[in-house]
Image (tube, helix red, strand yellow):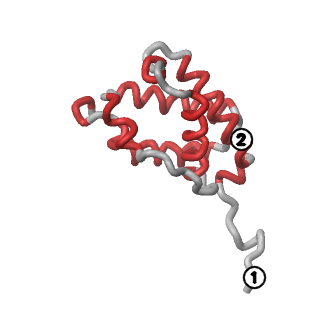
């Protein structure tokens, strides 16, 4: 049996428009985060073009797209920042608002929320959980 488009489920990544859509989401998301006085400080000394590229690669994986991410793990990158759960929640709210604003289907957003719940312990500092 050959695999055809009819038998291969379309990934969320493909449904929302692939790399261009992910890049647009990352740009809008970081615009929101950097405008948030509670969150902007985390990025003061961060190379933002590189940060945006990392998130785009990660988001592609979360959405079922190509896995080209080779950066640090979530815990390794975030635990030293002592992120409290309230800030993690705000980031999730900015991501949700971004996806809604870009017209991403509700079921895709729901799946992103599931992943956010699964990785929270890797991002939020144990002392701030």
Q: In which quadrant of the rendered view does residue 124 lie?
A: top left
What numbered label is drawn on residue 93? none
Which quarter of the rendered picture does the N terminus lie within?
Answer: bottom right
Q: What residue sits 58% from the left and 22% below the top?
A: 32
Residue 89 against residue 19 in the figure, above or below: above
Figure quadrant of residue 4: bottom right
Going by the image, does 13 lie left or right of 42? right
Depth check: give the residue in front, 40 or 15.
40
At a point 76% along the width and 71% down the height, the residue shown is 6
- The relative height of residue 81 versus residue 6 in the rendered view (above or below) is above
In the displayed structure image, the side of residue 114 where residue 124 appears, left or right: left
Residue 45 position in % (x across, y down): 46, 21
| Residues at marks 2 and 1, CA–CA distance in whole angstroms | 29 Å
Q: Earlier in the sequence, mark 2 or mark 1?
A: 1
Q: Position of residue 74 (x, y in %)?
A: 41, 43
* Secondary structure category for the residue under label 2: helix
Q: Which residue is mark 2?
A: 21
Quick check: 55 above or below 3? above
Q: Which residue is mark 1?
A: 2
Is 84 placed left or right of 101 in the picture?
left
**How many neighbours does mark 2 have within 10 angstroms: few (below 14), some (14-19), or many (20 or more)?**
some
Q: On the rendered image, what quadrant is the C terminus found in?
A: top left
């Amino acid at each position: 049996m050959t695999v055809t488009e009819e038998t291969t489920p379309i990934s969320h990544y493909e449904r929302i428009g692939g790399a261009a859509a992910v890049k647009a989401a990352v740009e809008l998301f970081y615009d929101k985060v950097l405008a948030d006085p509670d969150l902007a400080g985390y990025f003061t000394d961060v190379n933002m073009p590189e940060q945006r590229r990392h998130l785009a690669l990660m988001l592609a994986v979360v959405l079922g797209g190509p896995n080209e991410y080779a950066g640090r793990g979530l815990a390794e990158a975030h635990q030293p920042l002592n992120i409290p759960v309230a800030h993690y929640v705000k980031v999730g709210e900015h991501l949700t608002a971004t996806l809604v604003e870009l017209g991403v289907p509700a079921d895709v957003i729901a799946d992103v929320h599931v992943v956010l719940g699964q990785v929270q312990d890797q991002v939020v500092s144990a002392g701030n959980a």
